Amino acid sequence: MKLLVINGPNLNMLGIREPEIYGSATYQALENLVREAAAEAGFEVEIIQSNHEGALVDAIQQAYGKADGIIINPAAYTHTSVAILDALKTVALPAVEVHISNVKEREDFRQVSYAGMACFHTVMGEGLEGYRTAIRVMKDKLSS
Ligand code: CA2
């Protein structure tokens, strides 16, 4: 089974700023965790990070016919991007939304998630470990 993990803008800067919100682990540590959790769950995994909305849309479209599921942290585009929502709806693959922080307890402008409207589950506030949870949730969904 193939999994595509997509990370949005600025997540490549993890560990560099705002450790009180996002922790002190680096983006490389996040990729390592995802690869380990995916292997444990029996997934082949591809991980993509981009700061560009269109590149995220391209990645979602390219998953069509190739991946069995998508795990996505669209970062700031969570709260603005109808294009990412439309792409997720178009490919219609099972998708899980992940956020490192607990967005529910943050600013008003973070209270809408467009991408989340096309996801069957959301994980938030678990730090990087949230990606492991998301992978397990996806495994359960695809095994049922
Ligand atoms: O909690 C999350 O995972 C977010 O998706 C992170 C986004 C934020 O806009 C969302 O509301 C919630 C921001 C990612 C920025 O990542 C940084 C990493 C290191 C230093 C600064 C920002």
Image (tube, rainbow, N blue to C red):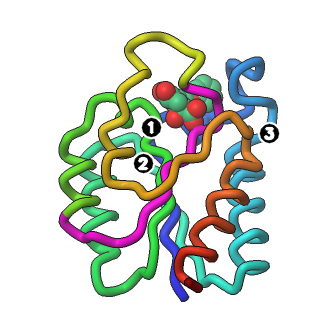
Q: Residue at x 28, y 78 (%)?
A: 64
The span from disc 1 to disc 2 (Cα, nearest Å) is 6 Å
Residue 102 in the image, given as x and y percentages of width and height: 63, 28
Q: Is residue 92 magenta?
A: yes
Q: Residues within 10 Å of mark 2 (few under 14, many from 20)?
A: some
- The residue that label 1 is drawn on is 9
For label 2, the SS is: loop
The CB of the residue at mark 2 lies under 8 Å from ligand 1: no
Would you say 113 lies left or right of 58 here? right
Q: Which residues are magenta?
A: 90-103
Q: Residues within 10 Å of mark 3 (few under 14, many from 20)?
A: some
Would you say 72 lies left or right of 99 here? left
For label 3, the SS is: loop
Observer-nearest of 93 and 10? 93
Q: Amino acid at mark 1?
A: Pro
Residue 107 in the image, given as x and y percentages of width and height: 48, 11
Q: Residue at x 43, y 21 (%)?
A: 110
- The residue that label 2 is drawn on is 50
Rendered view: 142 above or below 77 = below
